[in-house]
Structures are given as structure tokens and as C-alpha cells.
Amino acid sequence: MNLVLRAFAVAAALLAAGCAGLSARAPDESVEFELTARFAARYGDDAASGQLAWRHDVARDEVLISSPFGQGLARVTRRDALVTLVTADDRRYTAADAETLTEQVLGFRLPLRGLADWVRARPVDGVPAQSTYAGDGRLATLEQQGWRIDYLEYEAGRPARLRLRYPGLELRLAVSEWK
């Protein structure tokens, strides 16, 4: 797996899923959201694109990163205080938090706390942030923890297209479904 895909798997997901797909589950009252999206990631001169499926709640996350054609590339899981990344070639990386995991996999720490809030167009509570709003009152940009998040489009009141930038890394998400 190339470095940009690893960066995306850790940054855009920080969460988990199975390389064969998210398992079918009965509706779970604790799930805060589920989304499916297309992504494009650029890290330095490298770029990658594909699909992701993400299920999030307070205690756990599940993210499946797939190629544009649906082949599983990475599975990231978070269960309470343990984050695990499993690549398609079955390499496994585990850490207590996403920042430590990015250091193991990428060689440097990315401040990833906040992604679950940012995709829902809200800042992380208790963390300094700067934001701007569009004429319709929706969040247009958010700057927090060194990231800049641009909310490019909304659909049914939820973010549909986002651009997340951190020095040297750019992620674009086009959300196709919210649950």
C-alpha cells in the first residue's frame, strides 16, 4: 500500500471496517452515523482515490477503505482506546490512539481527533477553532488542530462534499449516503 493510501486510511478513517465489506447488523441505537463516500487523497506528490464506508459511535468506529472498483485496501477499527489498521496484504498496526498509529505507519504524527465532528459540520468541543458561515447559515470553513475543512456542498442539511487540508495532505470526500 503506498504512503498516500496509508495516510488516507489512517486520516480519513481512523476507524474501521472489513476488507470484504461492512458486516450486516441489526440497527444499533448507539450508532451516531454511518456514511459511504468517494475519496481522493493527495500526500505530497502522491495521490489515490477510492471509496469508504464508515460507521461511528462514541466507543467505536469501523471504516473500510476500498479501491474505486470496490476491492478492499484497508480496514481501520477503533474500539474504545485501541486503534488498528489492517492492510489488504494483512499487515497489522495497532496503537492506543490515531496519532501514535500515524507515527507508526507514516513516520509522523497527524492530529486526527475531530474527524467524526468535522464530517458533521461541527467543531470539536473545547478545542479552539475558527469558522466562517455561508449566507444560508451553514458552516463554510472550519480551521481546527492545524486542519482546514471546506464545506463545498450540502445535501438534505448534511455535508455532501468536503475538502480537508493539513500541511502536505489533502483529502476530498463526496458523501453519497448518510444513515
Image (cartoon, rainbow, N blue to C red):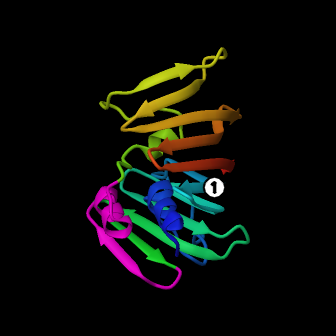
Between 119 and 80, the one lying in front of the other is 119
Determine whether the residue tagged by mark 1 lies in a helix, strand or loop.
Answer: strand
**Residue drawn at x 49%, y 39% as measured from the top left:** 118
Residue range highlighted in magenta = 88-109
78 to 19, vertically: above or below = above
Q: Residue furthest top?
A: 135
Residue 52 belongs to the span the image colors magenta: no
Between 31 and 112, the one lying in front of the other is 112
**Residue drawn at x 44%, y 31% as measured from the top left:** 143
Between 153 and 42, the one lying in front of the other is 42
Q: Position of residue 2 (x, y in %)?
A: 52, 72
39 to 17, vertically: above or below = above
Q: Position of residue 17 (x, y in %)?
A: 51, 68
Q: Position of residue 16 (x, y in %)?
A: 47, 65
**Residue beneath disc 1:** 40
90 to 4, vertically: above or below = below
Q: Residue furthest bottom?
A: 89
- Report how many numbered discs are placed on residues in the image: 1
Q: Residues within 10 Å of mark 1 (few under 14, many from 20)?
A: some
Residue 27 appears left or right of 103: right
Residue 98 belongs to the span the image colors magenta: yes
Q: Amino acid at mark 1?
A: Ala
**Residue drawn at x 46%, y 85% as measured from the top left:** 90
Residue 45 appears left or right of 59: right
**Residue drawn at x 44%, y 52% as measured from the top left:** 57
Residue 110 seen in render: yes
Q: Position of residue 154 (x, y in %)?
A: 68, 33
Quarter of image, res 96 = bottom left
Residue 37 seen in render: no
